[in-house]
């Protein structure tokens, strides 16, 4: 087995979202430093790592427990990674998931190290685990290159309309979007040279329909094409319900993705966004009742909009670029392996037994999928 570090997610690897940020990109970051890496879904992949397995957002069940047992018997360092607040009952109630908070927390407790994306998550995980480390989300090399391409070539907008964008991650952001609906409706009413772009699985109020094509809705796009969305955006918004622990734990991803294009972000003042955005310098922080004024200030003051966007671009370029994340991940993994790897001992017999169990599940699942495809094909005929 040539793979040294294996990233295994609870869900299949998608072209956007958390599996990109916490599996695909870190694997690439480490590969740039000479590590042999691989990523995949824990229910679709066999164990291949020689040094460490990173379990991404995996809940403890019969299969993941066998996987974990194999890793420990093999003498591998076990790392748990999450960028969401999955391990608290209160948070799960706010953001329903198929597994219980206990299933996530138990899996985390069994791993050597926990990696999280924000200081808030670190503080909560430290209540039950002795070694929790923060590694922030970053940008891919390709995404940064596209931003540079846009910056160098400059795309001429077809009109002078100012576009405000809300790029939703999932349907679970509806509660967050409701915080700004009234302000956005008033903005579109008061400023006829504005447009609202909403992207993602989000149900918006029918009140926006009266604005015709000044209200635009787009579905998800693959991450490889996501950069195109930013070419026509002037203001990015990141509303979050600060009274909910789940949203307090979210990373500053919306800020960094827009920032690399020189687009200013208005965000709710969660602890994470307060760390990333300095109000009036590289973006704006808005309380629930301040969204209209914050939006108005950037719509009516073009120089301020450009100044904040440029400051955001410089900050993101300096602190979130892939080269910096590569160094951070390399140092982090090296330190973790040095701290925990030396004390690991392999139990070959137990490792073989657990590998066979994982292999049997893998084969069963492949047969099940093949059978499902065959049935589907027969129905089509």
Image: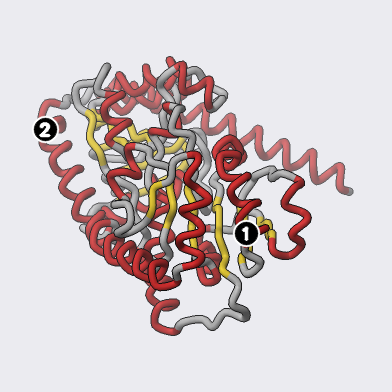
Compare residues 343 and 271 and report the one nearer the observer: 271
Q: CA distance from mark 1 to mark 2?
A: 50 Å
Mark found first going from the N terminus, 1 or 2: 1
Left/right placement of residue 138 relative to residue 332 reads right
Dot 1 and dot 2 residues touching (CB under 8 Å): no
* Residue in the picture at 21% in, 25% down: 346
| Crowding near the residue tagged with mark 1, few <14, some 14–19, many ≥20 C-alpha atoms within 10 Å | many
Q: Is residue 302 above or below residue 246?
A: below
* Rendering colour mode: secondary structure
| Crowding near the residue tagged with mark 2, few <14, some 14–19, many ≥20 C-alpha atoms within 10 Å | few
In the rendered structure, find residue 196 and report the number of the disc placed on it: 1
* Residue in the picture at 39% in, 48% down: 285
* Residue in the picture at 57% in, 65% down: 163
Asked which quadrant contains residue 115, the reply is top left
* Residue in the picture at 62% in, 39% down: 171
Asked which quadrant contains residue 1, the reply is top left
User: Residue 80: x percent and y percent?
Assistant: 32, 31
SS at circle 1: strand
Compare residues 358 and 8 and report the one nearer the observer: 8
User: Residue 361: x percent and y percent?
Assistant: 52, 27
Q: Is residue 107 visible?
A: yes
Compare residues 199 and 67 and report the one nearer the observer: 199
Q: Which residue is mark 2?
A: 339
């Amino acid at each position: 087995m040539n793979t040294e570090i294996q990233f295994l997610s609870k869900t299949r690897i998608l072209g956007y979202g958390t599996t990109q940020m916490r599996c695909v990109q870190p694997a690439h970051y480490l590969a740039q430093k000479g590590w042999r890496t691989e990523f995949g879904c824990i229910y679709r992949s066999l164990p291949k790592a020689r040094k460490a397995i990173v379990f991404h957002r995996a809940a403890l069940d019969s299969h993941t427990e066998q996987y974990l047992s194999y890793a420990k018997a093999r003498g591998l360092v076990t790392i748990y990674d999450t960028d969401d607040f999955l391990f608290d009952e209160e948070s799960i109630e706010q953001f329903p998931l198929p597994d219980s908070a206990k299933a996530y927390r138990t899996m985390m407790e069994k791993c050597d190290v926990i990696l999280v994306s924000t200081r808030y998550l670190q503080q909560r995980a430290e209540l039950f685990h002795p070694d929790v480390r923060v590694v922030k989300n970053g940008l891919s090399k390709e995404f940064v290159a596209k931003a540079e391409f846009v910056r160098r070539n400059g795309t001429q907008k077809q009109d002078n309309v100012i576009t405000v964008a809300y790029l939703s991650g999932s349907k679970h952001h509806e509660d967050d979007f409701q915080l700004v609906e009234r302000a956005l409706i008033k903005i579109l009413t008061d400023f006829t040279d504005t447009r609202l772009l909403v992207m993602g699985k989000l149900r918006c109020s029918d009140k926006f329909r009266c604005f015709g094509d000044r209200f635009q809705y787009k579905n998800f796009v693959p991450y490889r094409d996501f950069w195109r969305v930013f070419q026509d955006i002037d203001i990015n918004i990141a509303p979050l319900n600060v009274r909910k622990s789940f949203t307090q734990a979210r990373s500053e991803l919306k800020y960094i993705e827009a920032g690399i294009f020189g687009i200013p972000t208005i965000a709710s003042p969660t602890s994470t966004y307060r760390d990333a955005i300095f109000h009036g310098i590289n973006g704006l922080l808005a309380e629930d009742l301040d969204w209209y004024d914050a939006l108005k200030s950037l719509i009516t003051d073009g120089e301020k909009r450009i100044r904040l966007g440029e400051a955001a671009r410089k900050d993101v370029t300096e602190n979130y670029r892939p080269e910096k994340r590569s160094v951070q991940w390399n140092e982090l993994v090296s330190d973790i392996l040095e701290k925990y790897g030396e004390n690991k001992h392999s139990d070959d017999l137990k490792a073989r037994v657990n590998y066979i169990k994982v292999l049997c599940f893998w084969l069963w699942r492949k047969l099940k999928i093949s059978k499902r495809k065959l049935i589907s094909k027969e129905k089509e005929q």
